[in-house]
Structures are given as structure tokens and as C-alpha cells.
Image: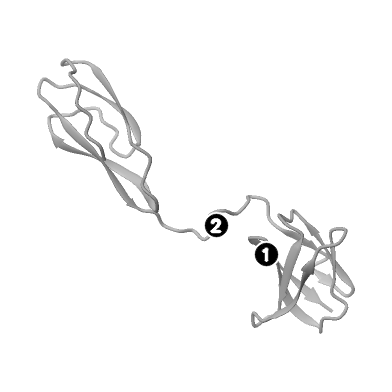
Amino acid sequence: SAAIERINLEGDIIELNAAPAPEGKVFKEWNVINGNVTGLNSGSASTTFVMPAENVEISAVYENQISTGLEGTSSAQLFVYPGIATESISIRNAETDEYTILNAIGKIVKQGKITSNSILINNLTNGMYIVKVGNKSSRFIKK
């Protein structure tokens, strides 16, 4: 983090804003290195404190970002219906028109483009499948 030097008077309200986190990191807390700082919300990337009589030194602390596996995904789920189908499945909330169908053991059994929000599945054997469209997936049963 970059050090910022400025002259502030005792009693001034000082506003702190953490610099953008480096790639793969998130803001964790403020670290008071020198000074008797009060009123600082150490867990907030934007906070204020009252300037004490002495000089202060404060730095932002960052930690590794924990992956949820959901980064880059849209909040709308892929909707596949009917859940049990014989001829075709209908798709809603697709990010793209390209799909992949995997069988229960994860083997790709069909790929293609969605046509009229529908995928023909009549040539698949009976069983459970996962259809993936972009970063989204959903299960269905071919009967």
C-alpha cells in the first residue's frame, strides 16, 4: 500500500479509503502501526477516525480471496423443463446457445446449439443427465 503524508490537526475527522485490492486479494482490516487512533472501524475498507495529538501510521491489510466457485456466474439459474423428458427439453436463462450434455459419470454425450429454446434428447438412452450452457448447469432425466 502507498503511504500518504498530510498534515492534520488534533481533532480533525480523517477519512480512510483502502486502495483497490491486488489481484486475488480482498481487504481484511486496517493496521495501526503508530499512534493512539480511536473510532476506527478496522474491518471496513472505508472508515473515519479522530486525529490524535501525535502522528499516526495506518496501513491496509489484504488477504487471499476465497473462491466460492460462483465467480463470473449470473444470479439467474439455468432453468430446464420438463425435469423428466422423452423427446426434448426446454431451456430458459441461457447465456449462450451452445450446450453440452453429460451423462451420470461426466462423459460428454451430446453437444450443439440450442434451437428455439429447445434441445432434442430423443436419441439419448434413459438416465440422468447434466446439461451445461455457459457457466450454468442443470439436471434432467431422459425416460
Task: Give above or below for 57 relative to 140.
Answer: above
Q: Is residue 135 left or right of residue 81?
A: left
Q: Is residue 105 left or right of residue 25?
A: right
Q: Quadrant of residue 46?
A: top left
Few, some or many residues within 10 Å of mark 1 (<14, 14–19, 20+): some
| Amino acid tagged 2 | Leu
Residue that carries the numbered disc 2 in the rendered image: 70
> What amino acid is at disc 1?
Ser
3D distance between C-alphas at marks 1 and 2: 12 Å
Instruction: Residue at 15% x, 22% y: name it.
Output: 52
Q: Could you say whether the residue bearing mark 2 is in a helix, strand or loop?
A: loop
Measuring from the top left, give residue 16's x and y in whole percent.
Answer: 30, 29
Give the mark nearest the N terminus, 1 or 2.
2
Residues 11 and 136: in front is 136
Figure check: 115 above or below 29: below
The residue singled out by tag 1 in the image is 137
